[in-house]
Image (tube, grey):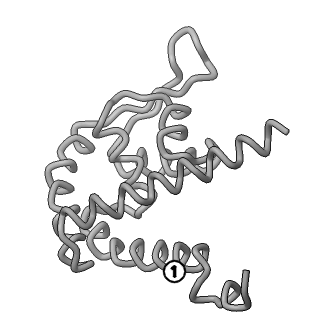
Amino acid sequence: MNDDDLLLERQLCFALSVASRSVVASYRPVLEKLGLTHPQYLVMLALWERSPRTAKDISEALLLEPATVTPLLRRLEDAGFVTRARQQGNERALDVALTPRGRALREQALAVPTTMMARLGISREEAAELHGSMMRLIAAAQASREAEAAV
């Protein structure tokens, strides 16, 4: 350990925070053309993978609290992209499904990854490498939290 370890530019948390804000800001004008915010885009990605899904399943897939996902789902429903309905036989479960408009939006969204790679000046391979690094970091952070919770 040395004094340089506390320099701001050496902090992983700082780099991740700035990178996250910067990348999400770069998505904003691209997603506005689709009528989506970045968090709504993430919900739609989950639903384009599989629809219908429960609200709980979407929350788990996005690693977000249900209280964070609920207003996103409400706004997506208001925009006509999804429907929400209580699951038959389980009033606590909320099924979320794409509408025809939500399914059609996927065709427009197909251009988003390529557009974003161009905006960020990275290749598909670099994007995959960054994604892999971030997923390993997420897994390590989750494992650390789970280990702390078990103590």
The image quarter in which residue 132 lies? bottom left
Residue at the extreme front of the image, as rendered: 1
Give coordinates of residue 40: x percent, y percent.
42, 55
The image quarter in which residue 32 lies? bottom left
Point 68% across, 49% down: residue: 144
Point 34% across, 77% down: residue: 26
Q: In which quarter of the image is the N terminus?
A: bottom right
Residue at the extreme right of the image, as rendered: 151
Give coordinates of residue 93: x percent, y percent.
57, 23
Give coordinates of residue 148: x percent, y percent.
78, 45
Q: Left or right of 85: which side holds 91?
A: right
Looking at the rendered structure, the secondary structure element under dot 1 is helix
Give coordinates of residue 82: x percent, y percent.
37, 40
* Residue 94 higher or lower than 115, as above or below: above
* Residue 65 higher or lower than 93, as above or below: below
**Observer-nearest of 88 and 146:** 146
Q: Name the residue that disc number 1 marks.
A: 18
How many numbered marks appear? 1
**Observer-nearest of 141 and 96:** 141
Q: Left or right of 66: which side holds 84?
A: left
Q: Left or right of 61: which side holds 56?
A: right
Q: Left or right of 130: which side holds 71?
A: right
Amino acid bearing label 1: Val
**Observer-nearest of 142 and 40:** 142
Point 61% across, 42% down: residue: 66
Point 53% across, 53% down: residue: 138
Residue at the extreme top of the image, as rendered: 89
Q: Residues within 10 Å of mark 1 (few under 14, many from 20)?
A: few
* Residue 70 higher or lower than 127, as above or below: above
Q: Quadrant of the C terminus?
A: top right
**Observer-nearest of 117 and 140:** 140
